[in-house]
Image (cartoon, rainbow, N blue to C red):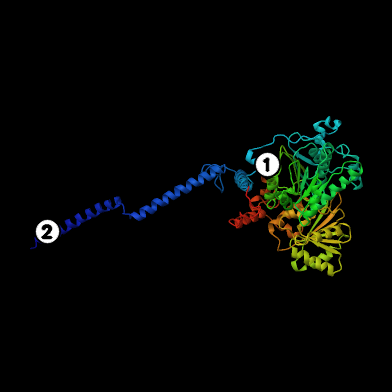
Amino acid sequence: MEDSEPERKRARADEATAGGSRSEDEDEDDEDYVPYVPLRQRRQLLLQKLLQRRRKGATEEEQQDSGSEPRGDEDDIPLGPQSNVSLLDQHQHLKEKAEARKESAKEKQLKEEEKILESVAEGRALMSVKEMAKGITYDDPIKTSWTPPRYVLSMSEERHERVRKKYHILVEGDGIPPPIKSFKEMKFPAAILRGLKKKGILHPTPIQIQGIPTILSGRDMIGIAFTGSGKTLVFTLPVIMFCLEQEKRLPFSKREGPYGLIICPSRELARQTHGILEYYCRLLQEDSSPLLRCALCIGGMSVKEQMETIRHGVHMMVATPGRLMDLLQKKMVSLDICRYLALDEADRMIDMGFEGDIRTIFSYFKGQRQTLLFSATMPKKIQNFAKSALVKPVTINVGRAGAASLDVIQEVEYVKEEAKMVYLLECLQKTPPPVLIFAEKKADVDAIHEYLLLKGVEAVAIHGGKDQEERTKAIEAFREGKKDVLVATDVASKGLDFPAIQHVINYDMPEEIENYVHRIGRTGRSGNTGIATTFINKACDESVLMDLKALLLEAKQKVPPVLQVLHCGDESMLDIGGERGCAFCGGLGHRITDCPKLEAMQTKQVSNIGRKDYLAHSSMDF
């Protein structure tokens, strides 16, 4: 028994040793062991890897697009202290990287703007339906019998450039006629020269120096000049000369004409232009020249009266788009022999509202015509679009399109809504009468008019809600000095000429900066100076205030503290692409990507989808 005990102990020891050796083997097996991962987990891991690869690829593509190399450890100098690179070198490297990023942002902005301009640009040319259908195009401008004096033709192109540079005239186009510095050299009859002298017009303005010879040569033209620069004479005097020539060759018979057509956006502007034409036609008749008849076709007047003139045959016609379309559709007026078309304040008509009407009017022309477009504010978008209607056009620009007249002192004041009416009386004391007050809404015009009458101020008011007779009487009383103050909506801001006005008051800031430029342009005309006072407050749209601030800075005017605190983010972005500001509306304080006018237009288009009545009169879609 004693002998068996040690054997049993030995066996246990052997088992223990064997067990020890097995655990070592098991440890080795544990090291090689791969844990089991469920199928769902494996799929998630695979998806994560694929997503990481895709993100990495996209980042590399963005870096290639922006013109910079993919970021690598060897390319970037790590931040912090380095033994082999100085702090100045590090600073320079970081500066270069920031500039590269800035350039790529500008390029991206320009590409985005080009896309927006393409999307809003009108695809159809501004041509008649017949011309588009038959593919008729005109390669050469209309030929006229007028030529500049021989000594002007013999002058060198360098001399012409010096004259243009002296008067700040910018021209674009081929074969531009020479600038002529006197009305006598433009070969106007003695009667017209006397008429100009009576009105105190002794020398042509810059737009007239280049514009009148261009039109007399038969060229199509886009004329851009600040308000009060004499644009109306540029297209009225040549049409009188052309009609006089036609009448001398072969007198106009009954129901014939017009030969020249001038289209204006408002009745008041059309009446004013018609008055200018009649003044010079009357002077020519007194000087033994043939009688030239001029018709006025505007809404609010009797069609019977207008037709009475047309039945005798008319040489010239001044019209608003609505009434002219009505007469054309009823075949009361014919444009068969019309060869001269001028669009005054063209940007307002080609723009949103009247573009369809103008296109319809164009379809009534039977042959090539000389087309002229004039305005103080004509953004690039409108210029490019208008060129589709013109044959080898000459663009004449005196000052930036949309710039305010430098003869106007602009004063911008912060006035609370409830204090406006009382403060208006104080502002009227700044200058002697006459004074022009503008308001955006018809209700505000009526309220201001009533308040001024209660305070004993001799005032009249005009807006679209009043009938034509009342509007005409109000403007005549104001023009003749019988009334001291005219209160109006923007209907009176386009082109109307009141020479004696020294002060314009904007009761509110218009929704578009173009309207502001036209409003303040009613003063500071024909070389005189004037004051424009504008009320602003929290109700004004910030983007329009930014445009106003930029306009004040451009004209070197005092910027009030309330506008000085306004900033539009990165102001360096406003000058990219060689053109400052917005290409759509011409505002200097924003780019086309933030244009409130474009946004409003797109919203209106979206809201009108599905609402058009194709059975309605004049709703044809050309």
Q: Amino acid at mark 2?
A: Glu
Q: Using the image as rendered, state which of residue 577 and residue 44 is in the foreground.
A: 577
The structure residue drawn at horizontal position 71% and vertical position 42%, both measured from the top left corner, is 365
Residue located farthest toward the top when viewing the structure as drawn: 154
Q: Give residue 592's position: percent from left, percent from top.
A: 65, 50
Q: Quadrant of residue 428?
A: bottom right
Judge the density around disc 2: few (<14), some (14-19), many (≥20) Cα neighbours within 10 Å: few
The quarter in which the N terminus is drawn is bottom left
Judge the density around disc 1: few (<14), some (14-19), many (≥20) Cα neighbours within 10 Å: some
Q: Is residue 70 visible?
A: yes
The structure residue drawn at horizontal position 68% and vertical position 41%, both measured from the top left corner, is 388
For residue 83, side relative to residue 29 (left or right): right
Give the residue at mark 1: 388
Q: Amino acid at mark 1?
A: Ser
Residues at marks 1 and 2, CA–CA distance in whole angstroms: 118 Å
Q: Give residue 563's position: percent from left, percent from top.
A: 73, 58
Q: Are marks 1 and 2 in contact (CB under 8 Å)?
A: no
Give the residue at mark 2: 7
The structure residue drawn at horizontal position 83% and vertical position 63%, both measured from the top left corner, is 460
